[in-house]
Image (cartoon, rainbow, N blue to C red):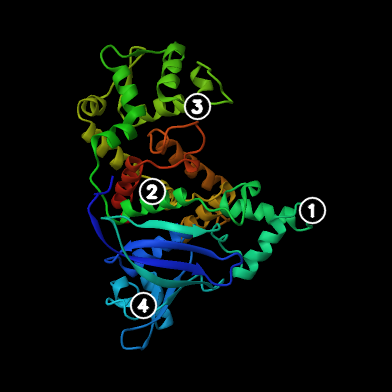
Amino acid sequence: MASMQTVPAYDLRISIQGTQPEIWRRLLLPETVTVTQFHEAIQCAFGWQDRHLFGIRCLDRSGEPRVIVGPDEAAEGIDAESAAGVVLSELIDPQWTELGDFEYEYDFGDDWTHKVEPVGSGLVPEGTITCVEGANRGPVEDSGGPNGYRRLAEVLSDEKHPEFYDAATWFSEVTGERVTAFEVTAFDLDAVNRSLGRLSLQLWPLPLIPAERDAVLRPIMWFLKSSAGEGLELTKDGYLKPAMVRSTLDELGWHDEIMGKGNRELNAKDVLNLRLHLLDWKLLRKRNGRLVLGPMGKIGLDDPDELWDYMVSTIGAPQNDALKLMTRLAAHWLVRGPVPSFTLRGELILTALEATGFATRSGDPIPESWAWDIDRTVRESLECLQLAVPGPRFALAEKELTDGGLKFLLQVQALLGDR
């Protein structure tokens, strides 16, 4: 949890111009935020996916026009000021005598212009950004600006429209949402603040606490504790005994409606996946038909902090370059949210592989199977941890990260050099 000490904040009303009904949010941000942090707050508050350039148009305190562009390297090619090092207080009159509206633009192709209106000052808990109120869901990424989004909304509201199927398919691929859930006027203040809470932890990291650590490591610690002493007896084919499978499903809440309460490891893929990874990570080993602790497993059982560090380094530093790239992508998507849909994810992975220099020996295009394989491999590793709020065993991408899960992924990103 963030400190309860409060700090001075700007109270800003931010609205997307040309939207009908108007899409807007009112944010309280610490006065010390940078322009880059302000950009990230807008991305979270409106549900943008940070795929495009952004810019700010304003007048400085002497009345001269000022254009600020990010990410930093983008400013070089368009003769604009880089966002690096600029703080929001430079754009707002500190005396509140002339508040001065300014514009934030996202995606220079679609031209999403956000009008930023300082409406006063306030207080927020230190290290937090808060949404006070707002209206209507954020636009759909790459939908063509206000007019394009308005057209998309009209089509999606009419199942008999001749373009409905194509629009619905595109919408689901881009957002990962079901088209039946699309509602222009939908606005969930709690969901926005959960997203901003994750962002706040990224911008102002807090120390990991034991309860968060233990929750993330819970599936692994369950197996280590169960394998201590004489170990776990395996079947003649090398699988866990049905009683252990059932106990694991019960302990971790991994039953689902499809598999029910099956007690065979081959029918409980999450249990099988976890056991195989613990063997691969040398936390467990097989000995005389039993599953026993490996050297690192013994250390981790006695010292959860050591186990945490070991798991960060193991997942965050795979030997294979393709898996390292995929880990970087997966951590970014989970931290920033939302995770791209299955179809879009495959396209993004292939693009990243090609941009990084991966190629087939024959020179043919990289097959989609490469993307799916590395995506699955990284996902299965991450699913050995409890990074998200416990619930039905569906895709990690569909769940809400816990604070501990977010801190784990941030450490992975730091190891990969992404933070």
Sequence order check, earlier mark of 1 and 2: 1
Q: Earlier in the sequence, mark 3 or mark 2?
A: 3
Q: Amino acid at mark 1?
A: Lys
Q: Nearer the viewer, mark 3 or mark 4?
A: 4
Residue picked out by circle 2: 324
CA gap between label 1 and label 2 equals 45 Å
Q: Is residue 48 visible?
A: no
Of marks 1 and 4, which one's residue comes earlier in the chain? 4
Identify the element where label 3 is drawn.
helix
Marks 2, 4: nearer the viewer: 4
Would you call the spot at circle 4 few (<14 residues within 10 Å), some (14-19), or many (20 or more)?
some
Instruction: Give yes or no for contact between labels 1 and 2 (Cβ–Cβ under 8 Å).
Output: no
In the rendered image, the vertical position of residue 94 relative to residue 21, given as above or below: below
Q: Are marks 3 and 4 in contact (CB under 8 Å)?
A: no
Residue depicted at 32% across the width and 40% down the height = 404
Q: Nearer the viewer, mark 1 or mark 2?
A: 1
Q: Earlier in the sequence, mark 2 or mark 4?
A: 4
In this rendering, the answer to whether 327 lies above or below 7 is above
Q: Which residue is mark 3?
A: 269
Separation of residues labelled 1 and 3 (CA atoms): 41 Å
Judging by the rendered image, the residue that carries numbered circle 4 is 99
Q: Which mark is residue 160?
A: 1
For the residues labelled 1 and 4, say whether their Cβ atoms are less than 8 Å apart.
no
Amino acid type at circle 4 is: Leu
Tell us which disc is closer to us: 1 or 3: 1
Task: Say which quarter of the image contains residue 91.
Answer: bottom left
> Does label 1 or label 3 sit earlier along the sequence?
1
The disc, 3 or 4, on the residue closer to the chain's N-terminal end is 4
Q: Residue at 41%, 74% (x, y): give it.
A: 74
Is the residue under label 2 in contact with that under label 3 (CB below 8 Å)?
Answer: no
